[in-house]
Amino acid sequence: MFKQHDTVFIGKVIKSSYKDVGTLNPKSRVTFEVKSTLKGRLNNNETVVTSVGSVFLEGKEYLVYAYKTTKENYLYKYEEGELATDTMCGGTKELSVANNDLEQIAESKQLHEILYIIIPLVVLFVIITLFLIVKRRGNATVS
């Protein structure tokens, strides 16, 4: 889930509204107070839309997986550029039941942090090795 979404965050619902847009489920607009950003760049308050019958309760905290809508991926009268999510297929859930997700996210972030350290070290090792090989060959031809 984490890789597939543009933004992932923990947020508390501070406001929600529903609008009939001529589909089976109304379009909901939910504003979250962002408590922790796990992926992406977010404001202190973010509004997310959904029309998949998701219900968000004011005062509750959620782990939110959201994506930016585009002409290719938005449904239910979304406007391009909105953040969208749902609780049925999109992974968004109440924080109280998100322990497995949070553990997987933490493991993924640790792996990325390790790679950010290992890759530059490997590159540095290769550069030093090449430098020493070139220097040794240069000294061998001078003798």
Image (cartoon, rainbow, N blue to C red):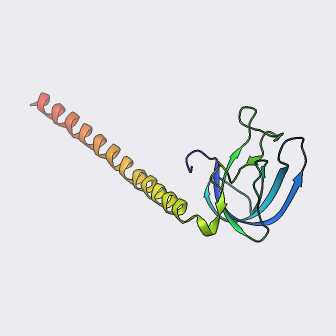
- Hey, which quadrant is residue 55 in on the image? bottom right
Q: Residue at x 87, y 58 (%)?
A: 17
> Considering depth in this image, is 97 or 83 the residue closer to the camera?
97
Residue 106: percent from left, percent from top: 49, 61
Q: Residue at x 55, y 47 (%)?
A: 3
Residue 95: percent from left, percent from top: 63, 66
Relative vertical location of residue 78 with respect to residue 140 in this rendering, above or below: below
Residue 21 falls left or right of residue 37: right
> Considering depth in this image, is 92 or 139 the residue closer to the camera?
92
Residue 142 falls left or right of residue 33: left
Q: Residue at x 80, y 58 (%)?
A: 30
Which quadrant would the C terminus be assigned to in this image?
A: top left
Residue 50: percent from left, percent from top: 77, 49
Residue 5 falls left or right of residue 142: right
- Total number of numbered labels? 0
Q: Residue at x 79, y 39 (%)?
A: 80
Farthest residue in the top direction?
141
- Hey, which quadrant is residue 37 in on the image? bottom right
Residue 100 falls left or right of residue 77: left
